[in-house]
Amino acid sequence: MMPVMEEKVLPKDGSLTIPVLIVGNGPSGICLSYLLSGHRPYLSPGASHTNPILQHKLEENRHLSIVDQDLEYLAEGLEGRSSSPVAVLFDTLLLPGGDYGLDHDSPLCWRLEPWQSISHLVLGTGLPGGSWHTMEGSMLTVSLGNWMELPGLKLKDWVGEKRRNRRNDRVIPAEVAAYYQHFVSEMDLEKNFVSSSCLTSLCRIGDVAESEEGGKRRVNRESGEGERSETAARTVWQAKGYQTGRDGAQTPFLIFAENVVLATGTHDQPTRLGVEGEDLPHVCHSISEFETAIIQGRVSEHSEPVLVIGAGLTAADAILCAHHYGIPVLHSFRRAVTDPGLIFNQLPKVLYPEYHKVHQMMSQQSVGGESASYRGYTSYPRHHVGSFKPDKKCILESWDKRQTVVKTSMVLVLIGTNPRLSFLRDNGSYLGLNTKMPISCRYNPLQIHPYTYELLQEPGLFAMGPLVGDNFVRFVKGGALGITSCLVKHYKRQHKQLLVK
């Protein structure tokens, strides 16, 4: 039985100013809260890493926690499946040999040092665990179970007997969601979490800060230096929003924060095609709508095919679901089946047999022809949607401009999701790598400093997780390390300056 989170009421009058405000209570926000609460990773006595160069570096400052060390120095020369050097570093320390399916013990041990904690709040629209509470509960996660873990609590130890015979050591989203919620309780982080809270406005108060000499100077938003400017520390963020009570009533809040961390993930808003007829009632953007239609009998093995649009894992889940119920499927996607960028060409066949099956379905047939091996499945590779019609027909267009009209019972547009950043100016687009495009975890992530995760355009504003391109839980932990290291060093410098004065 999961403990009920204590309701916290945030002030309406701006009377609360906190050092760190974390927006998002998924695994990114939870892991950051864990580190900010004073939990510190050290090299275990007698432990050694499989990488001898990294081991030598760790031995040099064994007395220091990883948070207090030079992350750039430790990460130098490491390679992994994330573009973030700190994410690769922390993943290498937590899961040595993880990319090769090896299960080496981590050389790290964790110590709770309360005096190192930094006061913070974590806002989330739902329960701790974020979007994991809304994911379909019957599908296995892409990541292995231990890849979903947060530091200090092994997932397999928590789930115990329930997952001993779990296929390929993978878990279902419902287990992961419960694990994250339990983690917050087990690690005594509940006091930092404010559930059912929605941020509607975030703006920085003042672009001018005092210099050390007492004069005024403008904040440098372009700085890419490893150590953040002390000027940035004097800016304050104003956060407005509302809390939803158990009775459904919405109560506004207004608070201030010295630093803000964006950890919202990307599951808030489905990506849309932007074509004619996309708002028709038979055109949907989530698997849950498909499952509801099955339960209500609106689609079945006797109905017209369901058209699935997209070539990602969510689209594959929909195809597997339809195949399970004998519902015929039409599958349209823009890429070629052999495209190396296709996610199915990046997943090991042994670990992901069901997704390999979908890839086989996509591969073993000609364009628009039903598969001999998989009855009821027809694919349209290198096609895009021209328009949807009220009579449930859809016009598909191929790469060579040929058009095909297909009859459908329902359409599932499953081409990804976008983050909800409406509380920022221009929906946060000015913070991306390309300021003229919407923020996208795949095509246009937020532009951060690679070791501190501070946004280059906004001092005092940080981002982590999918917003910066780290889409797997195993890599979001690196963001927590980088941000904590930056903030700890900043507040230590600030404390020294106060002592001197």
Image: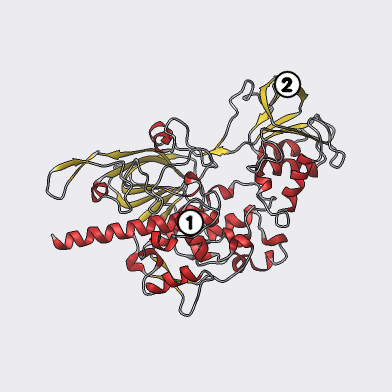
- Residue identified by numbered label 2: 402
Measured as percent of width and height from the top left, residue 315 is found at: 68, 40
Q: Quadrant of residue 285?
A: top right
Q: Please identify the quadrant where the N terminus is shown.
A: bottom right
Residue 316 appears in the picture as rendered: yes
Q: Residues within 10 Å of mark 1 (few under 14, many from 20)?
A: many
Front residue of 310 and 140: 310
Name which residue type carries label 2. Arg
Residue 119 appears in the picture as rendered: no
Label placed on residue 341: none
Name which residue type carries label 1. Ala
Q: Residues within 10 Å of mark 2 (few under 14, many from 20)?
A: few
Q: Secondary structure at mark 2?
A: loop
Q: Secondary structure at mark 1?
A: helix
User: Left or right: 242 with respect to 236?
Assistant: right
Residue found 74% across the figure and 41% down from its top: 319
Measured as percent of width and height from the top left, residue 93 is found at: 50, 65
Give whichever of discs 1 and 2 has the lower sequence position.
1
Residue found 70% across the figure and 19% down from its top: 390
Measured as percent of width and height from the top left, residue 340 is found at: 65, 43
- Residue identified by numbered label 1: 87
Q: How many marks?
A: 2
